[in-house]
Amino acid sequence: MNDTMQWAKGILDKLCQKAPESIRKAQKLSGIPYTVKKGEWAEGYGIDWWTNGFWPGLMWLLYRHNPNLLFRQEALRGEALLDKALQEFEKLHHDVGFMWLLSSGAHYALEGDKDSLRRLTLAGDLLAARYNPNGFIRAWNDNGDGSRAGWSIIDTMMNLPLLYAMSRLSNDARFKLMAIRHAEFAAKNFFKPDGSVYHIVIYDPESGKVVDTPAGQGCAPGSSWSRGQSWALYGYTLSAILSGKKEFLSCASRVADYFIAHTPEDRLVPVDFCQSPERPIIDNCANAIAASGLIELSEQFKDERPKDAERYLTFAIELLKALDSKCAVYDDSIPAVLPRCTGAYSDGHPEYPILYADFFYAEALLKLCGEKLLLWTMP
Ligand code: GLY
């Protein structure tokens, strides 16, 4: 085992040691953990909250490292809680990929559970139903007035694996074609000349013409929200793997190069790469997502672009080491591990734990241990 593997394994061991107390605290909730308040887990905004698949997903990752049955049971408990969100499907949004790929998709792929397959299929149909034939998946709902019918966000790139899975599971290319069209249309409309991406592009829903690119969760219109860059980097890498289209790897590497060039020396990623130095707030989620995405991108470039592959892997390890040495909490003082995440630049009280940072941290560390499990591409 090399030094990096040894180091990654050591952290995963700590995550697995911490998890039973964190699970005990999660079981006090009626829903699923999202953040931490006063040392206890707190839920998101309802069972349809977009991050609710990351908890069962994290449990599957930990179970892979350490086959403690508690982790599996907790993954199944989380998956079952999500059934209420499927029943109240009218509240759902484009993040159904996050919600069901990492819960039911993992359960089906790892154990062949047939109910999980049905949940996954329903979620996939809901995602496909959001497709606008101009070439984009509608992100969010409105109150029926159509005001968000043309809203597309870069985060959707990470939900496309559900559509690719749908085509594999049903032998029907329609879903995969929607995913490819969305990725191609976003490649045209989200990228700025410097390689970074907008968070939101608002299209005219009838013509598909770009109408606006508002600030979204970044600091200003036209700025470079760091988590959005990490969603793009990882999302385009996954689309390249799942579609076989090399041009998506170029999209991923453009945004990766921007990300690397703009990350400060201490490797703690700011909330927005364009933010003022007078408000130096950071987002641990962006570190962890980008690290996991870069490891995957590095894998894709191993044969054809070995120097880039090495560069991406080295940078991913630096991002993870910064989290480990400067941020992570491995004791039980809080149930989460990464405490300095930020939902949006406009947050009044930024830098708090957000569960999915822990998911991507664990995922990236598992990859460094040689684990090939990739929940995004499995079902
Ligand atoms: N997908 C929403 C976010 O990253 O905050």
Image (spheres, rainbow, N blue to C red):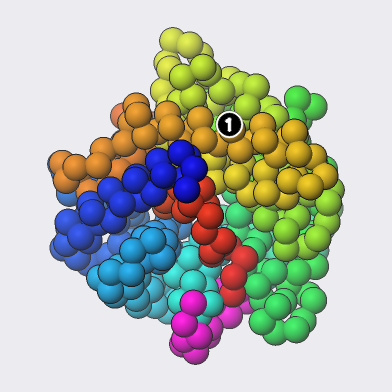
Quarter of the image with the C terminus is: bottom right
Give the SS element for disc 1. helix
Residue 312, x across and y down, in percent: 64, 36
330 up-or-down from 83: above or below = above
**Amino acid type, mark 1:** Phe
207 up-or-down from 351: above or below = below
Note whether residue 254 is visible.
yes
Q: Is residue 217 left or right of residue 340?
A: right
Note whether residue 145 is visible.
no
Q: Is residue 338 left or right of residue 243?
A: left
Q: Crowding near pointer 1: few (<14 within 10 Å), some, many (20+)?
A: some
45 up-or-down from 262: above or below = below
Q: Is residue 121 magenta?
A: yes
Residue 333, image quadrant: top left
Residue range corresponding to the magenta coloring: 110-127
Identity of the residue drawn at 73% across and 58% down: 241
Q: Which residue is mark 1?
A: 315
